[in-house]
Amino acid sequence: MTNTSSLTPEVLRALQAVDTPTICNALEIVMGGRTTEGFTKLPVVCADPALPAMVGFARTVRIRASQPSPRPPAEIRELRLAYYDYVASGDGPNVVVIEDADWPDPIGAFWGEVNVAIHKGLGVAGTLTNGLLRDLGALDEGYQVIAGALGPSHAFVHVEEIDCPVSLFGLDVNPGELIHADRHGAAIIPAEYIEALPEGIDTVTRKEAPILKAARAPGFSPEKLRVAWGEAEDVH
């Protein structure tokens, strides 16, 4: 479980202010090297690509839509209501992370106009799922759903399990891990790096600045790139 005390309001604002690629770069700075783990590896679709990044602690869930739930109706209803209690629990912010057990062939959308309205009303920061999204044009503004694909029907969609390890887009997520996600995909911010990440973001920005300034100026050349690259390497 992530240490929520590390996510102060100041740190949260710093994380929300940048995109997920910047977070991945900043993590390389604070971890001391590159990695092939901790981020999504497949394309995603977004309810609104223009929305800023969502940041929150993972509320993990597994769903299925290709066949009806074997549970009796009363138990299905209670599990669904327990799900809503779960995603709204804790100090937050929370991001719902849902693995569709029908992957790689999801058939029913859990996410559409009704669920977006419910989750936005409950104060959830956003959703990451490898399942389907529908009702584009009817979704409440300001709530991001990052999904695997679009689809028109909900089929037999139902909640199978809550508060469980999940895997989606090549990323393994445990309950309570801190998630940063936008139209590029998602990354996990390990608890031990949360406090240091704003400084890592600042370092990334300062390293990129001389290269970007030189590249965008008139008369840019390989020689000027070498100079700018040297300036970037001197940033710590």
Image (cartoon, grey):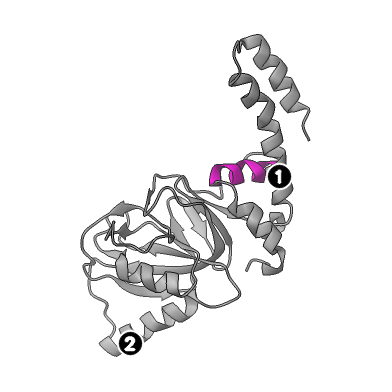
Q: Crowding at label 1, few (<14), some or many (≥20) Cα neighbours within 10 Å?
A: many
Name the main secondary structure of what is drawn in magenta.
helix
Q: Amino acid at mark 2?
A: Glu
* Mark pair 1, 2: CA separation: 47 Å
| Magenta stretch in the rendered image | 20-30
The residue that label 2 is drawn on is 75
Residue 182's spot in the image, x, y percent?
A: 48, 50
* 103 sits to left or right of 97: left
Residue ID at (23%, 74%): 68
Looking at the image, which residue is at 78% across and 35% down?
236
The label shown at residue 153 is none
Quadrant in the rendering for residue 3: bottom right
Residue 35 visible in the displayed image: no
Question: Is 193 displayed left or right of 112 in the figure?
Answer: right
Q: Residue at x 55, y 46 (%)?
A: 19
Q: Residue 222 or 216: which is nearer the viewer? A: 216
**In the rendered view, does 54 fall on the left or right side of 168?**
right
Residue underneath mark 1? 200
Specify few, some or many for label 2: CA neighbours under 10 Å numbering under 14, 14-19, or 20 or more. Answer: few
> Which secondary structure lies at badge 2?
helix
